[in-house]
Amino acid sequence: MVRLQYANIPGVNLQHTAVVSLVLATCLSSAAIAETIKEYRYTVGAKANISVETQDGAISVKPGSDNQVVVTATLKSNNVEVDQQQNGNRIEIASHLLHGTDQTAKVDYELLVPPDATINLRSSAGPLTAERLQGDLTLEGADAVVIVRNVDNGVVVVRTMRGPVTLINVHSNHVDIDSISGEVHLKAVTGPLIRARSGSGKIFYDGDFGSEGNYKFTTHGGDIEAIVPADVSASFRAHSVLGRVQHDFPLRPKHSRFHEEVGRSFVGTSGQAGSEVVLHSFSGKIRLKQR
């Protein structure tokens, strides 16, 4: 307990000291309830469906046991609460404000889930992180930083407005990324169908384009850069309407209906041409580099 003793000090106004004491007590009380941690546990079957939504907090998901979902929610304010419900194999969690608008009223979530669970995450500001999972993933946010690492088998869908997107070591059935202005970074990402699109953000790929997938990277005003090994096996088609296009590969000519324009486009194959790679930008630069 804090005690303020001013009674015997000359020149000190007791009424003012009472106000100071009240303000200090209020601040201490607010600090004590500013952060609350709650834990929720659920028993689920195979391929559970889990949805989590928060306004501007962080959400992270990692694998846990095969039949348990553990959610740790950190409430940053006493003006926010967590709604949670389970219907069979489906779990829905969301946070909302109790009293008006509070800039600090956010909830951070940490989840441990079965590796094969279907995950849906949404946060305005994020960040959103998922790693070492095998089920389908959907991550959405306006300014949220999205990071997906070490994911296999499932479908990965990412939607952002300005938030950057990073996928590392993802070997998926289908990757679908859309961002209005956020950058997209893909490292060691392969699969039968990989699509990334950004309105004005850069798209960067570092990998080998797999062996027999379809890859399509599209921007309006952003650049596209791909770094691949010398023994890459892919068929390439690149075009920028206003930007420059270049590559440092000895690509073999490929018969195509696509009109090739020097400095604006190129078409060719490398290796066994196992994967199909399409790179398109309206005004950005496109560069295919050899690692």
Image (spheres, rainbow, N blue to C red):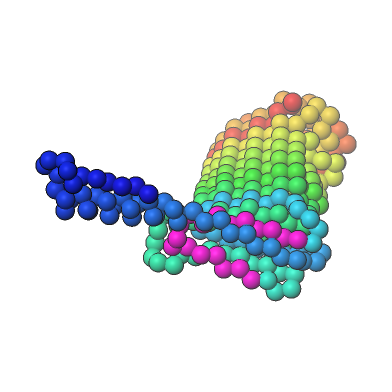
Query: In the image, what residue occupies the spot 79% across and 62% down?
Result: 67
Q: Is residue 251 magenta-colored? A: no
Q: Position of residue 287 (x, y in %)?
A: 65, 32
Q: Position of residue 169 (x, y in %)?
A: 75, 40
For residue 187, above or below residue 40: above
Q: Residue furthest front?
A: 8
Give the total number of marks visible in the rendering.
0
Where the C terminus falls, by quadrant? top right
Predominant secondary structure, magenta span: strand
Apparent side of residue 4 relative to residue 29 in the rendered image (left or right): left
For residue 93, above or below residue 171: below
Apparent side of residue 205 relative to residue 74 in the rendered image (left or right): right
Q: Is residue 239 visible?
A: no
Q: Nearer the viewer, residue 18 or 201?
A: 18
Q: Residue furthest left?
A: 11
Q: Nearer the viewer, residue 184 or 37?
A: 37
Query: In the image, what residue occupies the spot 45% across and 56% down?
Result: 33
Q: Is residue 77 magenta-colored? A: yes
Query: In the image, what residue occupies the spot 68% across and 67% down?
Result: 91
Q: Position of residue 193 (x, y in %)?
A: 77, 50
For the record, the magenta segment spans: 68-85
Query: In the image, what residue occupies the spot 79% across and 29% down?
Result: 229
Apparent side of residue 137 relative to residue 18 in the rendered image (left or right): right
Q: Is residue 73 visible?
A: yes
Q: Residue furthest bottom?
A: 87
